[in-house]
Image: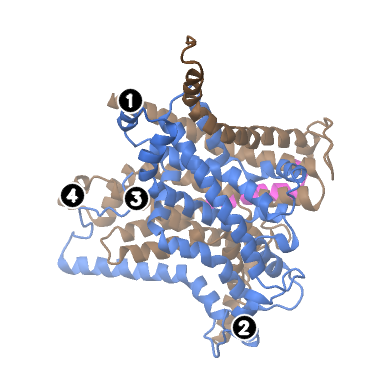
Chain colours: A brown, B blue
Amino acid sequence: MQRKPALGSQGWANRLAALTPQMVLLPTLIAALVYVVIFSLWTLWISVSQSTLLPNMAYGGFGEYASLWKSKRWIVSYQNLFLFGALYVSGSIFFGTLLAILIDQRVRYESVWRTIFLYPLAVSFIVTGTVWRWIFHPQTGVELALQDLGWIAAKFDWITDRDMAIYVVVFTGIWHASGFAMALILAGLRSVDGDLVKAAQIDGASMPRIYRKVVLPTIWPIFVAVTVVLLQFAIKTYDLVVALTQGGPGVSTTVPAIVVYDLMFQRGQIAQGAAAAVMILVALALVLVPYALWSGWRARKEARSHG
Amino acid sequence: MADATTHQEFDPLATGSRSKQRRSRAIVYTLLVVFALIYISPLLIILTNAFRPLEEIVREGFISMPNSMSFGYWVEAWSTFCIGGTCEGVSRYFSNTLLMTVPATILSTAFGVVNGYALSKWRFKGDMWVFGLITLGVFLPAQMTLLPWAFVLGKLGLSNSIAGLVLVHTVQGISFTTLFCRNYFVSVPDDLIKAARIDGAGFWRIFRRIMLPLSPPILIVCVIWQFTGIWNEFLFGTVFTSGANQPITSAIVAFSGSGTGERHYNVEAASVIFAALPPLFIYVIGGKYFVRGLTSGAVK
């Protein structure tokens, strides 16, 4: 740009004004750089440092990753993540789809039903876990209620059973998330072209068949999106388990996020805790990076076919 | 993406004979009622137990018809219940959470709106990189940031303080609000902005005169989303604060997690309701926007 002496200060003012968007974004950019890039690298470095109870930034190698993968707790937590993740995601989508289809039948008081099925999402995991623990616990919940009704031999103690406790976590997770799946799938159902369904109806197809063969297949991208979001929730699961079972009985319902907290703040093994945190990041990346690449590819394909 | 409230133009149940249609309709409503009962039951159970005497709960459990009711447990829960050695009730932790949630919600929403506007309507070199970096913050697991945050908060003198939590939640929240607002503002026609710029309007003038009047829907989405998310958050609160400075979620874990000692189920139930009430209230008022936040955040 040419300097014009006559305009002097105004030229500078203009140039400054042109930079306003960048200036406005600067604080956020710095915060995001620190938060996303520096913090991640920092934790990554701690995981290969000699830190124990206190940070010691001298390089210590990848030994902590090796010990992490040798510890029984971590193995159990990862197995739990797979079992919980699979059942939680498929269960939430199954019930979410069912509820969405039911609401899609021109039912009366639609907004009331929607409000009822979605409200758990506004309730914290801590509250959810606390309440369901009371319901599931043999001393306070279903078992006692059944015995009070006269069924003296009634037994329902999954939450204190090493083999069954994880299914209590799964159930509670589905209770919390199926409304979320319902809301997104319902929005998808409403975006389906009505003529498509009318044509199938004229052909004499039954309602369940129309959904299975015509409606649900056309909204498959929504199912992919819901799956990715729920998998993300599953990998980050922490509060729900803390409030519901505290990872117990024993370590039977431990999840990776609980191991991270314990290593970092209870056992004073900062480096191994950081290594566990990095493993959570890796799990998330395994879900999100392919999804991001795939949606980018789809968006480009769509842009080409429209252009 | 179509709004969930749009009405469909066909009736899927309008197939088959009249009696078959009636039967399908009966099945649909039966299933809806059954599911509704499962979804509502925890709420009903906890609500009734906040009124029942302790002996009754200990004897009959949580799932039982109340014989006698009292409002006293609510008062005790709010003002005198002992949590972790502090006998000030949940009111203390309630106000901790409120003092954390309100500033963090306002700050992150304010930044998000301006950022979203700058990123969607002012092209500059590298703008997509800036947006990408900010968006990554949405996905970064909190565990990756715990140790650095603990160090930074210590250096800033914000350890074990509400102000520290406000900082953490604001920085994390800006990622969400920027993503929401940017995706919303992209649909505002560029011609509108171009015309205003030709008329000599600058960045802030366009923001005030054009963008802000269009913003209320996305502002509500951001506020609802941030308020519920921050109010319900547990990990940061539990790691960065302790004792009487903790938010209400940590307080609940403090009294209900300890297996030892005498239990006060009725007072605990009332305390849990206090913790659940504000986000539920927001959800009931702004349910429509809540869903819109979900759809814009998850399905793009």
Q: Which residue is mark 2?
A: B57
Chain letter for mark 1? B
Q: Nearer the viewer, residue A8 or A109?
A: A8
Check disc 2 and give the amino acid type. Ile
Residue B266: x percent and y percent? 62, 79
| Left or right placement of residue B31 versus residue A260 in this view | left
**In the image, what residue occupies the spot 58% across and 52% down?**
B103
Chain letter for mark 4? A
Q: Which residue is mark 4?
A: A198
**C-alpha distance separating marks 1 and 4:** 50 Å
Q: Which residue is mark 3?
A: A187
Check disc 1 and give the amino acid type. Ile
Badge 2 vs badge 4, beta-carbon distance below 8 Å: no
Q: Which residue is mark 1?
A: B198
Chain letter for mark 2? B
| Left or right placement of residue A28 versus residue B245 in this view | left
Residue B101: x percent and y percent? 58, 56
